[in-house]
Amino acid sequence: MSLNIRRKWVAFPFLVAAVLYGAESGTQLLVQVRPEALLLQQDENAVGLRIRLASGTMARIWTDRSCGLPESDTYLVSRSGTYIIPFSAIENKGATTICLSSSDGSISTSLQFLSSR
């Protein structure tokens, strides 16, 4: 009988250690979602946009030859999502580059628009 009690006392510290270790260990997962944008030519009349904006920011889309400063008549996007933008809404005579810039500066991209016009 004393051997049986001795086995229980030997196993007890391991049981306590396992419970304490399980109570203190945990798993954390950190996910960062960053702003990004993707411009795609849909056809010769429209451009597709998939965008994820930071809270409180907007994106401007315009056509230009060099994607310098945005024109005053830019197309504004204020929410994340998927958009189909008619080329006529952003067209600038002679410009074939579609430019995008976010108001916080975290996104800046462009797309060479291929047109058969």
Image (cartoon, rainbow, N blue to C red):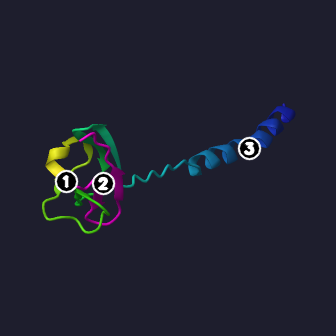
The residue that disc 1 covers is 78
- Does 111 appear in magenta? yes
The residue that disc 2 covers is 97
Residue range (magenta) = 91-117
* Observer-nearest of 7 and 110: 110
Specify the amino acid type for callout 3: Phe
Instruction: State which tag comes first along the sequence, 1 or 3.
Output: 3
Specify the amino acid type for callout 2: Thr
Q: Residue at x 25, y 69 (%)?
A: 69
* Observer-nearest of 8 and 29: 29
Task: Give the quarter of the image for residue 55.
Answer: bottom left
Residue 16, how many percent across, how many down?
67, 46
SS state under label 3: helix
The numbered disc on residue 14 is: 3
* Residue closest to the far bottom: 69
Q: What separation in Å lies between label 2 and label 3 (alpha carbons)?
A: 68 Å
**Circle 1 or circle 2, nearest the eye:** 2
SS state under label 1: loop
Specify the amino acid type for callout 1: Ser
Q: What separation in Å lies between label 1 and label 2 (alpha carbons)?
A: 21 Å
- Does 104 appear in magenta? yes
